Image (cartoon, rainbow, N blue to C red):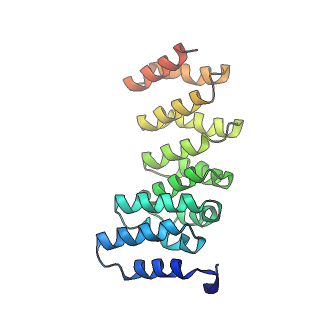
């Protein structure tokens, strides 16, 4: 934890502004000011901002956490379990933007554990950063997800790694998927090789 004496007065002022915000406009302005500091002392307030159920605040908080970078990774990972699905999605977005390998296990876990398609899709995108067999395995398993948008995202991620014989073998069965958009996407990728 960062000691109080390590926090510049300008950051303290922004944090105080956030603590005193009383309406959505004040809250957005305060979160923007906090995010713009890019100071590690603002990680916790930005994580809290991910719970405010306000799309504009979500975006500012995600950008702020991403701009802080590496120091925000472990606090984000630790908080994912305590977030609702919307906040979890935003937290995973921030991790994706940071691009730190420590998030890998979070992507793997929430791809399997979360009931929300948007969370599973962002996990696939996160795993897309790691072009190795383990990531391919997790993404390939998502091709059997019941939600078509998750399967679609998995197809795109696998294709982005290049069309290998193994990738072809997992995509070919999707040419007879019940969802037309999945059949078309799989056929398009297979035809492009």
Residue situated furthest bottom in the rendering: 5
Left or right, 170 with respect to 134, comes to left
- Quadrant of the drawing holding the C terminus: top right
Q: Is residue 97 above or below residue 150?
A: below
Give the percent coordinates (x, y) of residue 74.
Answer: 63, 64
Give the percent coordinates (x, y) of residue 17.
Answer: 41, 80
Q: Is residue 140 above or below residue 85?
A: above
Find residue 3 and report its image quarter.
bottom right
Give the percent coordinates (x, y) of residue 167.
Answer: 62, 24
Residue at (52, 69) in percent of width and height:
37
Foreground pick, 157 / 58: 58
Left or right, 51 with respect to 99, comes to left
Residue situated furthest right in the rendering: 133
Find residue 68 and report its image quarter.
bottom right
Residue at (45, 19) in percent of width and height:
176
- Quadrant of the drawing holding the N terminus: bottom right
Question: How many numbered callouts?
Answer: 0
Foreground pick, 153 / 58: 58
Q: Is residue 106 above or below residue 155?
A: below
Residue situated furthest front in the rendering: 10
Foreground pick, 45 / 156: 45
Residue at (61, 59) in percent of width and height:
69
Give the percent coordinates (x, y) of residue 110.
Answer: 54, 52
Residue at (57, 75) in percent of width and height:
41
């Amino acid at each position: 934890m960062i000691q109080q004496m390590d926090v510049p007065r300008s950051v303290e002022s922004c944090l105080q502004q956030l603590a005193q915000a009383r309406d959505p406009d004040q809250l957005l302005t305060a979160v923007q000011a906090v995010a713009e500091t890019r100071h590690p002392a603002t990680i916790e307030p930005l994580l809290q901002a991910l719970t405010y159920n306000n799309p504009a605040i979500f975006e500012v908080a995600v950008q702020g956490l991403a701009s802080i970078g590496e120091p925000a990774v472990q606090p984000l990972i630790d908080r994912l379990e305590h977030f609702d699905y919307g906040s979890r999605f935003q937290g995973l977005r921030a991790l994706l933007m940071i691009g730190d390998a420590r998030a890998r296990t979070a992507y793997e876990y929430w791809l399997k554990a979360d009931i929300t398609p948007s969370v599973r899709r962002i996990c696939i995108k996160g795993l897309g950063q790691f072009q190795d067999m383990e990531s391919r395995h997790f993404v390939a398993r998502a091709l059997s997800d019941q939600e078509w948008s998750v399967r679609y995202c998995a197809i795109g991620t696998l294709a982005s790694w290049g069309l290998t014989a193994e990738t072809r073998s997992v995509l070919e069965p999707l040419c007879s998927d019940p969802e037309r958009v999945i059949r078309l996407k799989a056929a398009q990728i297979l035809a492009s090789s």
